[in-house]
Amino acid sequence: MRILSGCVIVSLVTLIGCGSSEHETESSAAEQTVRTAEVMGFNVWYSDASGDALETPIVITGAEYDLVGTAAAFEWLVSQYGTLDADWRMLLKRAWGDEELFIDEYVIELPSGEERHHFFDLTESYLKWPD
């Protein structure tokens, strides 16, 4: 798996907003609890994986397009930690990928100085764009 360089698009936070509609539900296929949210007009699903390691990323589905997948990752971070640059700050965004899998890693810092790593599997929407 190779590292792909990427830049942080902080303006995505404004695209996704602070008020997403979310609820807990069951995935009939996997029987695992997932969270859903509306992001840029798409209903996206987040797996219940821990997301704290490259081997256990949070899988984002339903994003359909690359930008929506990235916005969904930001929405997850905002829903967990609050407002970017007020409640937490972004230290690094990096992409991991090959022909079969594409994962974004976000390293954030909390006000306490604690760093946290979060990994999101964006394979479903990677490099897909509207016609």
Image (spheres, rainbow, N blue to C red):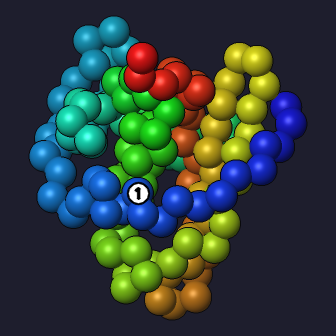
- Vertical comparison of 30 with 125: above or below: above
Which residue appears farthest toward the bottom when viewing the image?
112
- Vertical comparison of 128 with 33: above or below: above
- Does residue 4 appear to the left or right of 103 in the view shown? right
Tell me what residue is drawn at x 32 percent, y 31 percent: 45
Which residue appears farthest toward the right when viewing the image?
2
User: Disc count in the image?
Assistant: 1
Tell me what residue is drawn at x 48 percent, y 44 percent: 70
Tell me what residue is drawn at x 15 percent, y 58 percent: 19
For the question of whether residue 53 can be seen, the reply is no
Q: Give neighbour class at mark 1: few <14, some 14-19, many 20+ (Cα, 10 Å).
A: some
Label 1 sits on a secondary structure element that is helix
Question: How far from the left and from the top, in percent, is residue 5?
Answer: 77, 50
Return the residue nearer the eye: 107 or 63.
Answer: 63
Q: Amino acid at mark 1?
A: Leu
- Residue of label 1: 12
Tell me what residue is drawn at x 48 percent, y 25 percent: 129
Question: How far from the left and from the top, in percent, is residue 89?
Answer: 51, 78
Question: How far from the left and from the top, in percent, is residue 66?
Answer: 50, 33
Quadrant of the image containing the C terminus: top left
- Does residue 14 appear to the left or right of 52 in the view shown? left
Which residue appears farthest toward the front when viewing the image?
131
- Does residue 44 appear to the left or right of 48 in the view shown? left
- Vertical comparison of 74 with 25: above or below: below
Return the residue nearer the eye: 104 or 64.
Answer: 64
Question: How far from the left and from the top, in percent, is residue 120?
Answer: 54, 42
- Vertical comparison of 76 with 69: above or below: below
Quadrant of the image containing the N terminus: top right
For the question of whether residue 104 can be seen, the reply is yes
